[in-house]
Image (cartoon, rainbow, N blue to C red):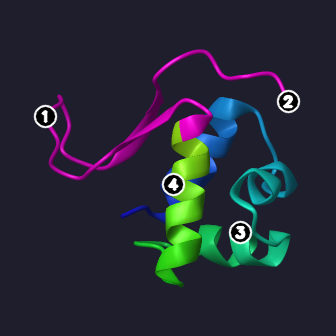
Amino acid sequence: MITGPQMRAARALLCIDQKTLAELAGLSVPTVQRMEASSGNVRGLIESLTKVVAALELAGIELIKEGSESIASGCGVRLKMPPPTY
């Protein structure tokens, strides 16, 4: 669904910190920290994962799945639109 590196990259594109992502997703900062510490797919409650993905998408992030059509084959993130100002 989403990897730790994707979460960190998405936050960097949005210029937000872990606290802001936690607020946007309705989660605690330690939960976001644990999720981002994952080297591969984030493990956790489906509800928490869904909240993070929804918050990132609402903020303008598009998650790119591994093997999606592109020059490279890895997973990643990109902005769908300019990031909102927080």
Cα distance between the residues tagged 1 and 4: 20 Å
Q: Residue at x 59, y 73 (%)?
A: 48
**Circle 2 is placed at which residue position?**
86
Cα distance between the residues tagged 1 and 2: 32 Å
Q: Amino acid at mark 4?
A: Val
Measured from the top left, where is residue 66 in percent x and y? 23, 53
Residue count near mark 3 (Cα–Cα under 10 Å), binned few <14, some 14–19, many ≥20: many
Mark closest to the chain's N terminus, 1 or 4: 4
Q: Is residue 77 left or right of residue 64?
A: right
Q: Residue at x 77, y 60 (%)?
A: 22
Mark closest to the chain's N terminus, 1 or 2: 1
Q: Is residue 86 visible?
A: yes
3 or 4: mark nearer the eye: 4
Q: Is residue 13 left or right of residue 62?
A: right
Q: Residue at x 86, y 56 (%)?
A: 19
Q: Residue at x 81, y 72 (%)?
A: 28
Q: Are marks 3 and 4 in contact (CB under 8 Å)?
A: no
Measured from the top left, where is residue 47 in percent x and y? 53, 75
Q: Are marks 1 and 4 in contact (CB under 8 Å)?
A: no
Cα distance between the residues tagged 3 and 2: 18 Å
**Circle 4 is placed at which residue position?**
53
> Magenta stretch?
58-86
Mark closest to the chain's N terminus, 1 or 3: 3
Q: Amino acid at mark 1?
A: Glu
Cα distance between the residues tagged 3 and 4: 12 Å
